[in-house]
Image (cartoon, rainbow, N blue to C red):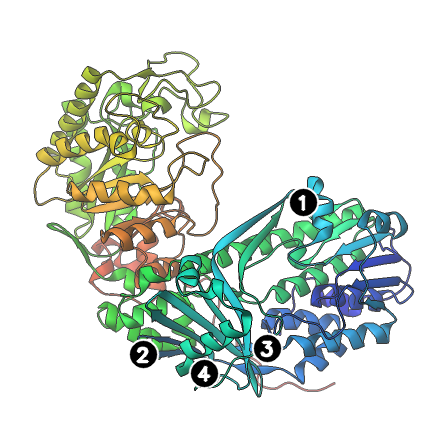
Amino acid sequence: MRPPSRAADLATAGSGTADAGAADRIAIIGGGPGGLYAAALLKRLRPDRDITLWERNAPDDTFGFGVVLSDETLGGIEHADPVVYDALRRHFTRWDDIDIVHRATRHTSGGHGFAALGRRRLLEILHARCRSLGVELRFRTRAPDPARLAETYDLVIAADGVHSATREAYAQEFRPRVTTHRCRYLWLAADFAFDAFRFEIAETEHGVMQLHGYPYAADASTVIVEMREEVWRAAGFDEIDPPASVERCAKIFADALGGRPLRANKSAWTTFRTVVNDRWSHGNVVLLGDAAHTAHFSIGSGTKLAVEDALALAACLEERPTLAEALASYEEERRPVVESTQRAARASLEWFENLPRYLDQPPHQFAFNLLTRSRRVTHDNLRLRDPRFTASVEREFGCPPATPPMFTPFRLRGLTLRNRVVVSPMDMYSATDGVPGDFHLVHLGARALGGAGLVMTEMVCVSAEGRITPGCAGLYTDGQAEAWQRVAAFVHARAPGTAIGIQLGHSGRKGSTKLMWEAVYSAEPLEEGNWPLVAASPIPYGPRSQTPRELTIAQLTAIREEFTAAARRAAHADFDLLELHCAHGYLLSGFLSPLTNHRTDAYGGPLTARLRFPLEVFDSVREVWPEDRPMTVRISATDWADGGTTAEDAVPIARAFVDHGADAIDVSTGQVVADERPAYGRSYQTPFADRIRHETGAPVIAVGAISSWDDVNSLILAGRTDLCALARPHLYDPNWTLHAAAEQGYEGPGAGWPAPYRAGSRRPRTGRTDTPKPRLTLGS
């Protein structure tokens, strides 16, 4: 196994000259696996250390049953402490399959690889290792006040769990944020071993419940029963005692359990809490494991993260010259890993919270959706692990033979896209007086030749005053229309099979700014030559931004006519699709958000009133846009700011546009207010598209940090989106779609190479491949 980068150093580190950062007296608060393993590592590295661990419970007290550890974590343990690894290895239960049981149908996906053992056995192994090394273990003893420990020890490790008293004692320094989620769950066990990791869905008269189960010994399995809070209450679990809950859960999931009973271990219904801290250390006090961070059990074990924390902390203490540097290095190393894990855990947690949304999916797609819910398991992962299962999902989806999901066609009104890839609208700020020139022809033409199903223009402004910058393209003169017609004609003639769409918008309060690469900060006003701004309400975007004028009723009518005139020109220019830009804080988006619309007339107040003007514009454009050509709408599904548009608001916003004739919703987020706090991460905006798709039934376009063809295949096959729009990847590689096809060995109609480019349809060789390989290895 390949260990984490620092683990090999731990295996060979000696107990020679102590570094300045190597603490001699260490106090550890909390006797869970993280605290115990940290104690063992630190004592093994430097036997002369004085290490004391306090645990308020008895040695054999534990509140769970099984612990799942990944191969990566086990590799780190093996290299850092072979004694612990060998002891663990003797008790592992291993399995490869995941079973998903839904509506009496069982789907099995193999090749996953899990290892688990009992939590009590894990603690026994770590207790023995600590004692053999000379760690002082004080059970049934509360730790002294952390401030007192900090005065008398060189280092205090707070491994005291999700309810950490140490964290709370230093709350002003650590700045914890604890989020309580929507589901109740009960941690139980069964006295038999499942033959796979099992997910079972029960649709009861009270609502949906789910079982998570996995073996951790030859004769025992962990069983977690989970459901939404409202289902838990409707089922009466809030009114019965724990033994009655256990008995009732066994009846609900009798098929999964084979009629066997469940047992508890101080088990109580609880809600999961996600713990995040702005800082992990203060002075000589450092947080570890659940005290520092938590990740939902549906993607793995909190024990895994705690053990990895211990490995990193021990390594940093060996490597850094001072304690301060060691603790800073520990957090620097672990925080990105933990944040990535927490993003995946949040996606998984929310998938189960919203499980009813997916119940009516086709059965194979439902199973695939569950397996890929965290975005860590992908289409390509599953294709390698279990090609038979993945092929069954693709057949059910309708993929032609040997066709990846992304290359299946998709129809919007009279337009059939040959694949599911969209070149997202990207402002280029390269027009002169709103006229697109050679740059636009080459830029959009190159991406059309690159194989995408749909290429979108940047936001094309409906008036000179509606531009974001002086370099923005427009469609408010006939000369601009002629220039755009040249671009569309090139795409249709030279990239047959690729559609070209136009996005119409008005900058609103975010106009009259510098070009992106000339600005120091977002939406920086021009030094000179500014034009007056208009918006739903007179609220500037930023502290240095111009204050817009509130639009009058007459001005609203005039702007609506500007959109309509631009749409007529777009139709004449022969664009295949038109998108109305109602996102990112521009004019129409400014009407939708309560943070930017403070009007007291018929266009402000409740959401239905805030929708009024954008819908009027949509209706006017749809009236002049050719009937057989589709219209889409881009929205910001959340403002990422308190008091703004939320994911709950996004559904009725999307539904309103669909009811007025929108053919798809392009689901973006944010950029509405300057003080937003987005939760960035891989495909971080996709859950908003997923929700809108399933709650409105409308097609959606997902955007936001989708960068690989594997992501595109996964999102489409899981039913989370219909199309994927990619921006930066198409700046990096105009031929992104064609290269995705080549890398997957696909040569079908969904990604036809232009005739002049066909000779380049296979990846060029990058070095010699004819060097003879060794035939014989001789010993020394």
Q: Which mark is residue 279?
A: 1
- What residue sits 29% from the left and 49% below the top? 701
For label 1, the crowd category at 10 Å Cα-Cα, with few meaning under 14, some 14 to 19 and many 20 or more, is some
Cα separation, mark 3 vs mark 2, equals 26 Å
Which image quadrant: the N terminus? Answer: bottom right
Element type where label 3 sits in the image? strand
Cα separation, mark 2 vs mark 4, equals 16 Å
Element type where label 4 sits in the image? helix
555 above or below 702? Answer: above
Cα separation, mark 3 vs mark 1, equals 31 Å
**Relative to 148, is 622 on the left or the right?**
left
Do the residues bearing badges 2 and 4 touch, measured as CB atoms within 8 Å?
Answer: no
Where does the image place residue 628, in percent across and percent down from the top left?
8, 45
The answer to whether residue 421 of the structure is visible from this angle is no
Q: Which residue is mark 4?
A: 257
Q: Earlier in the sequence, mark 4 or mark 3?
A: 3
Element type where label 2 sits in the image? strand
Q: Earlier in the sequence, mark 2 or mark 4?
A: 2
Which tag is nearer the camera, tag 4 or tag 3?
Answer: 4
**Relative to 115, is 472 on the left or the right?**
left
Which tag is nearer the camera, tag 1 or tag 2?
Answer: 2
Q: Which residue is mark 3?
A: 116
Say which of 773 and 691 sits in front.
691
Cα separation, mark 1 vs mark 2, equals 46 Å
Three-letter code, disc 3: Ala
- What residue sits 39% from the left and 51% below the top? 706
Which tag is nearer the camera, tag 3 or tag 2?
Answer: 2
Three-letter code, disc 4: Leu
For label 4, the crowd category at 10 Å Cα-Cα, with few meaning under 14, some 14 to 19 and many 20 or more, is some
Q: Which residue is mark 2?
A: 105
Do the residues bearing badges 4 and 3 touch, measured as CB atoms within 8 Å?
Answer: no
Q: Earlier in the sequence, mark 1 or mark 2?
A: 2
